[in-house]
Image: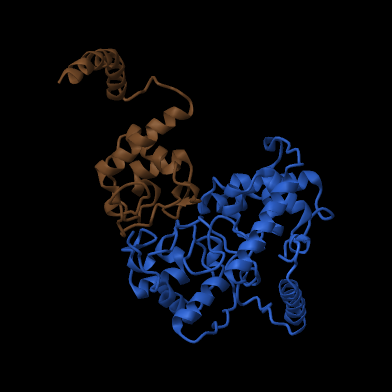
Amino acid sequence: MIILRRKKPSVYVVATLFVLMLLGIVGGVLFVYLGLYNVSALKQHTQPVYAVVDKALRASISQRAEEINAPPLDGFDWQGEGLRLHRDNCVQCHGAPGVAPEAFALGMTPVPAANARMARERSVSELYWVINHGIKMTGMPPWKYRLSERQMWSVVAFIKQSAYLSAEDYQKLVASLDTPESSGGAAASPARASTGETPEERGSLAVQQYGCVTCHAIPGITGAAAHVGPPLGGIANRAFIAGVLPNTRENMIHWIRSPQEIDPLSAMPGLGVTEEDAENMASFLATLKDKRP
Amino acid sequence: MRSSRALAVPLRRLAKGIRPVLVLLTAATLAGCPELDWGTGKSEVQAQKGAQLIRDYGCGSCHRIPGITGADGLVGPSLELIGRRAYLGGVVPNQPETMVRWLMDPQGVDPRTAMPNLGLAEDEARAISAYLDTLK
């Protein structure tokens, strides 16, 4: 518009802008109709797309959660109703202290956020809003027509309390429920070996597909910025795994496959990782060299 | 020469005026500031004390710790953003109380951990915990 108001609008400038705009529209249409964007859930979005979508998601939730008047949570039965509802409806995707999500949930893109992370990083109102409304295109359903308000607040109360539970505490609480049921747990059937050219590439994909990103910050993996467990940058040079085991390739594979065999108290859950996938993951982790500042 | 002499008088006066303030500040620092409860200020003082203790105990020989010069150990995990970490030692939920317990008696929390017991006093563990809590 500014250009048009000038005394002598250059025909070339206007024409160039027009052509560029046209190209943009044609490009956009072709991008959509030729199916250029890869919707495969095997690979995460590219970093810029992920960053924009993630920002939009967080802003949308925090804006809307502001309108919620949260009641005091000590009025809700987190150890009974909250824990039971969480075990029956939430653990399958989000896990619990020491309990992994089910196999299907680990393969989702975006992968459901770890319970421990939400418990620490999300406000009470945000948790309630997301449970009530769900989130489009993420697999998170709205529970508005499935649970009462009181039940949803009980679940929020449990999630918040779970930040203070060790894996052992959680098992004790679940055992104390009057309707015991096998909860969450590792995949029963082995996952298919992941694809890729080199072991490192296959390992990088496996790290994404087993949901490692929900708990660990991992350089080079889009969306891996959680701090439930330790960050894995520089893991190649670290002396110990989990502060317990000398960091060798064999030990790393063993640890990835069955953390509780190495440290029964570990909050890291067994994820049903196959031998082959664990080997690839170890190869990938060996590329995460320490960068001296 | 004359100008420097003319300057000397007000400078001496200034030094005299500042002296009581300096004495007070030094006294407060030496006393460890337990009575200086200025809300957030107290935890800042605690955190600074903690940073010094982290240097004294050599935590940096095993851990990378932001804000501590030379703390670039690779034996245990990096402590970047440890204030946000959900579990300590991968075992116990991260809270101020559990952090103090973990620092004072790692084997009491996880018998298998390679983190050594450094014989920290409770107030030392609290100060270190205050510093680590700033890393988020």
Q: Horizontal placement of B90 versus A188: left or right?
A: left
Left or right of A201? Residue A100 is: right
User: Quick check: A287 left or right of A38?
Assistant: left
The image shows residue A156, relative to residue A274, as above or below, that is above
Determine if residue A182 is in view: no
Coordinates of residue A208 in the picture (x, y in percent): 55, 71
Q: Residue furthest left?
A: B1
Q: Which quadrant holds the N terminus of chain B?
A: top left
Q: Position of residue A54 (x, y in %)?
A: 64, 60
Instruction: Determine whether A154 is above or below A281 in the image.
Output: above
State the residue lying farthest toward the bottom: A197
Which residue lies at the image location 45% right of the left edge and 63% below the top edge?
A: A260
- Occupied quadrant, residue A243: bottom left
Nearer to the camera, A95 or A111: A111
The answer to whether residue B117 is left or right of residue A59 is left
Colour of chain B in the rendered structure image: brown
